[in-house]
Image (tube, grey):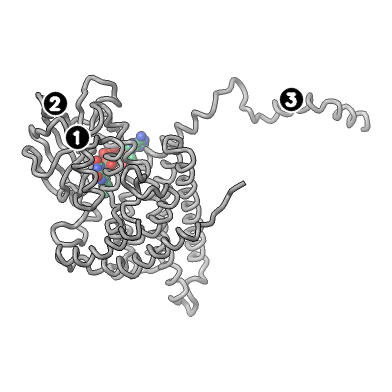
Amino acid sequence: MVWDFHTEPEFQEDLDWIRDVVVNEIEPLDLVQSQLSVEAWQRATEPIKQRVKDRGLWAAHLDRDLGGQGMGQLRLALMHEILGRTRSATILFGNQAPDSGNSELLAVGANDEQKQRWLWPLLDGKLRSCFALTEPEVSGSDPTTLTTTAVLDGDTYVINGRKWFASNAAHADFIIAMVVTNPDAGPYDRASMLVVERDTPGLRILRDVGTMDHPWPGPGDRHAGGHAELEFTDCRVPRENLIGEPGSGFTLAQKRLSGGRIHHAMRWIGQSRRAFDMMCERAVSRTVHGRPLGNKQFIQDFIAESRTEIDAARLLTLHTAWHWDTYGPEQTRVQIAQVKYWGARVLYNVIDRSIQVHGAMGFSTDLPLEAMYRLARNYRISDGADEVHKSFIARNVLKGYAAVEGYPTEHVPTRRASAEQQFAEYLDLATANE
Ligand SMILES: Cc1cc2nc3c(=O)[nH]c(=O)nc-3n(C[C@H](O)[C@H](O)[C@H](O)COP(=O)(O)OP(=O)(O)OC[C@H]3O[C@@H](n4cnc5c(N)ncnc54)[C@H](O)[C@@H]3O)c2cc1C
């Protein structure tokens, strides 16, 4: 019987090291990031990246045979809980979205030549990437309706269409675009993944779409983030840029997103925890009517609800990671959907309460809470809206149930009648004794 919540001591040392770097080096760096030139940012961050590499923690999200550290999801989850505290931490650990998901996709779908060209430099941090699926004209929740096409003309694909919310596109060296290559196939076999390199004629980055969270401070014009709208007009890419088989886009997209959702959810726990610590510190520091805020039952409710929600989300996420390590990703899809929507909700709730407890200061830019709040709102939409994940969970859960004729299984009169038959001899005795 193994049902253990301990972290092995060797890995705990790694976690302690990560926490030290994140809290004492990366969090302070993030505070001055917008004041640094690109070169200054690189000079400041390169030594940290090197130490991360030396410790074997760089780009840890992939299995060893795919170019990563082979840690397994559970260790990764614990690591991401700490990285989630601040934005640049994943970048300095080689785990940042969308590059991390794209490297997972290339690791499972690309051939050797493609890996040489895009995967290894991506894992090394020498290239940056983008993933473009969502389109402005059709629902991103239903990618079977994608309209961007890629038509084979000799040895080149000719792409036409428009994408948006392609994170990082303006700064990426290459874009992985989900495009319709097989229009006559079934809904889940029509699309493929094509790599489009920066500066390919016919690819135009139209704008970075303004959002609640954008623009955010970053090092010069190479800062991470930005969600671009882009257009393909007779954009020609070589046939060799196709990842996997024609029509395999949906299968690859699924592989790309799954593990990342666990890491996202653990990063949200880290963020929630940071907002929670701020809330508790304020609750014992600020006095109202001569007593600490924490003496008020309303505030105690915030604290109890937040603590319990964070713990529940953490256990759910760690269990999901364990489930993946034990049974594999395919068997863990429902749990992944659970942590995606539930984790985003907990994060949003906890930050909201923490802002409330800080009053006007919580709303101000003197604290990181307002920025955390703006960012947190997107997690209920990006990477699949809450409703899509809930619907997936419910549909899968319901597969385990069969319809019954007549009364429900738990219908008391029916069950009692059956129990009376089962225990008839005792009932007879009871009646006889009356
Ligand atoms: C910050 C951010 C970053 C992003 N980065 C990327 C990226 O890098 N690459 C990329 O391709 N895309 C990206 N996206 C896009 C994201 O994946 C889509 O926004 C998301 O899939 C929803 O698609 P949509 O915006 O078209 O909304 P729609 O599909 O139009 O859905 C709108 C709303 O309808 C409701 N809804 C949808 N489906 C259902 C359902 N089945 N049942 C009930 N209600 C439903 C939900 O409330 C949903 O929010 C990003 C989005 C954000 C906000």
Tell me the element at label 1: strand
Report which residue position mark 2 lands on.
151
* Residue 382 in view in this figure: no
Q: Nearer the viewer, residue 264 or 382?
A: 264
Circles 3 and 1, Cβ within 8 Å, touching? The answer is: no
Please tell me the numbered disc located at residue 324.
Answer: none
Question: Which residue is situated farthest in the right direction here?
Answer: 433
User: How many angstroms separate mark 3 from mark 1 (CA)?
Assistant: 62 Å
Provide residue 405's location: percent of width, then percent of height. 59, 20
Residue type, label 1: Leu
Q: Find residue 250 and report its horizontal and vertical position in percent.
A: 30, 31
Q: Point out the residue furthest to the left here.
A: 201
Q: CA distance from mark 3 to mark 2?
A: 66 Å
Residue 43 position within the rendered picture, expressed as x and y whole percent measured from the top left: 19, 66
- Position of residue 289 relative to residue 22, above or below, is below
Q: Earlier in the sequence, mark 2 or mark 1?
A: 2
Figure quadrant, ligand 1? top left
Crowding near the residue tagged with mark 1, few <14, some 14–19, many ≥20 C-alpha atoms within 10 Å: many
Q: Which residue is mark 1?
A: 194
Circle 3 residue: 418
> Mark 3: which secondary structure?
helix
Q: Amino acid at mark 3?
A: Ser
Disc 2, SS: strand
Earlier in the chain: of badge 3 and badge 2, it is: 2
Q: Is mark 3 within 8 Å of ligand 1?
A: no
